[in-house]
Image: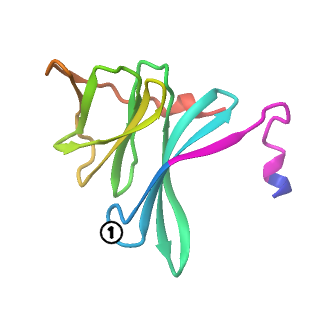
Amino acid sequence: MEENKKDYDEDVNYSYSLIHHDLNVVHPDDAIAIFLENNLQGEQIFIAYFEKINGHWNWKQTRGSEWDTTQKWSSMNNVPYIYSGAISDETIKEVYAGKEQAKIIHVKGNNRFWYAISNNKDVTVKYVKEDGTEELIEEIDEEMFKD
């Protein structure tokens, strides 16, 4: 633990808040958790995928997003392919990752977070607005989450 501790800036107060969780999302004994993290980049939102193996929860994959970025989604690289992203535009009423409609979670204010689970890798992501218009969305560059 001491070895990991030295990697963190002592002046930054890292904090975490669980926003949402679902159990048995792909199969029995798995789960997703959506949480906020305050770190060197400010507030970021993440989704993590877990599987329960031999009675213990194992953290398998994680992806994150920021509220004020032009790139609004990312996907996990392994099965299950979980697509997710942040939205703050109130006119967005639905999000699709390929043919899968996303679940949208209200976080705070106008900020919402969505995720969709797909059997397919590299699908197109689109928003559907209140007026029925559709907009294709650009994927997040994961490099922005590195310190």
Disc 1 secondary structure class: loop
Name the amino acid, label 1: His
Given the current orientation, which residue lies at the most extreme bottom position?
54
Range of magenta residues: 4-19
Q: Residue at x 38, y 55 (%)?
A: 78
Residue 27, compared with residue 32, is above or below; it is below
Q: Nearer the viewer, residue 7 or 84?
A: 84
Q: Is residue 147 left or right of residue 58?
A: right
* Percent of width and height locating residue 135: 22, 21
Please give the residue where the numbered disc 1 appears in the rendered image.
Answer: 27
Residue 125, compared with residue 32, is above or below; it is above
Tally of marks: 1
Q: Is residue 117 left or right of residue 47?
A: left
Q: Quadrant of the N terminus?
A: bottom right
Callout 1: few (<14), some (14-19), or many (20+) C-alpha neighbours within 10 Å? few
The question of residue 128 being in magenta is answered with no
* Percent of width and height locating residue 48: 49, 51
Q: Residue at x 68, y 33 (%)?
A: 39
Given the current orientation, which residue lies at the most extreme front position?
109
Given the current orientation, which residue lies at the most extreme left position?
132
Q: Nearer the viewer, residue 68 or 109?
A: 109
* Percent of width and height locating residue 31: 44, 61
Q: Quadrant of the C terminus?
A: top right
Q: Residue at x 24, y 55 (%)?
A: 119
Q: Is residue 102 left or right of residue 2?
A: left
Q: Nearer the viewer, residue 5 or 103?
A: 103
